[in-house]
Image (cartoon, rainbow, N blue to C red):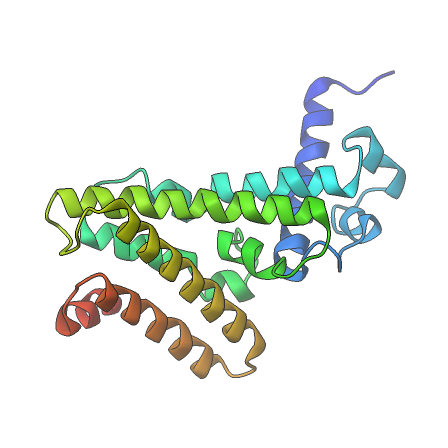
Amino acid sequence: MPYPESHKSKTKERILASATELFSRNGFHKVSIGQIMKLAKMTHGAFYAHFASKEALYNESVRLTLDNSRAARLVKGPLSLQHLTELVDNYCNLQELEAKHKPGPESVLFNEIGSEKAEIRTMFEASYLSMKKMLETRLLALGKLKKLPIATDRKMVADKARVILASLVGAVAIAKSLPGEAERKQVLMATQRQILLMLGVSESEAEHMLQM
């Protein structure tokens, strides 16, 4: 007797959830199909009933991470500087590095830096460009509304988005490599502070916003 469609859908979701957790923590190359299926508490053979390959699973996992991240949801919210701060904060949330929460998009970028696999490099680029566009859209809107003291020149805004992403991914890379929690938090907090200062927020206001 064949399984109902709802069962197949739930099984696929379990595989995706396990894969997303492992890929976000360890990267594509350090995760095997066997590890994914073990975490999902399913047999190895069940994998190919849902995905053609590990690459296909990874591709869907990346899209799921970006679509479901808190940062992606935040970008649809109101246009305010506080909201942008929350968006920045959620790109490098320390808890998402350690606890079993939904992984942030910065994990996707960090884990695949320097990959030599063509498919992964393509997905890395797509992930990067998606987040860069999201930041550019938010910065342009806040500039036009005079809620950020930045020019609305697209080239300048694009450069600021690049700096934000480079800073955040770098901060996450360092934080993940440090054993001490206190210094990890300081690295991430300092990065957020410098991003806000770069965007024209005063030091006192930046300090206030980061304490909220």
Image label count = 0
Q: Position of residue 78 (x, y in %)?
A: 22, 40
Residue at the image point whose x is 89% and y is 38% from the top: 45
56 above or below 101?
above
- On the rendered image, what quadrant is the C terminus found in? bottom left
Asked where in the image residue 88 lies, by quadrant, the reply is bottom left
Left or right: 195 as drawn, with respect to 38: left
- On the rendered image, what quadrant is the N terminus found in? top right
Q: Is residue 126 visible?
A: yes
Going by the picture, which residue comes out furthest to the top?
A: 1
Q: Position of residue 21 (x, y in %)?
A: 63, 53
Left or right: 4 as drawn, with respect to 146: right
In front here: 155 or 197? Answer: 155
Asked where in the image residue 14 lies, by quadrant, the reply is top right
16 above or below 188?
above
Q: Position of residue 179 (x, y in %)?
A: 56, 82
Q: Position of residue 194 (x, y in %)?
A: 29, 71
In front here: 201 or 154? Answer: 154
Residue at the image point whose x is 50% and y is 57% from the top: 106
Residue at the image point whose x is 19% and y is 46% from the top: 152
Left or right: 122 as drawn, with respect to 154: right
Q: Is residue 79 visible?
A: no
In front here: 107 or 35? Answer: 107
In front here: 168 or 51? Answer: 168
Residue at the image point whose x is 73% and y is 26% from the top: 8
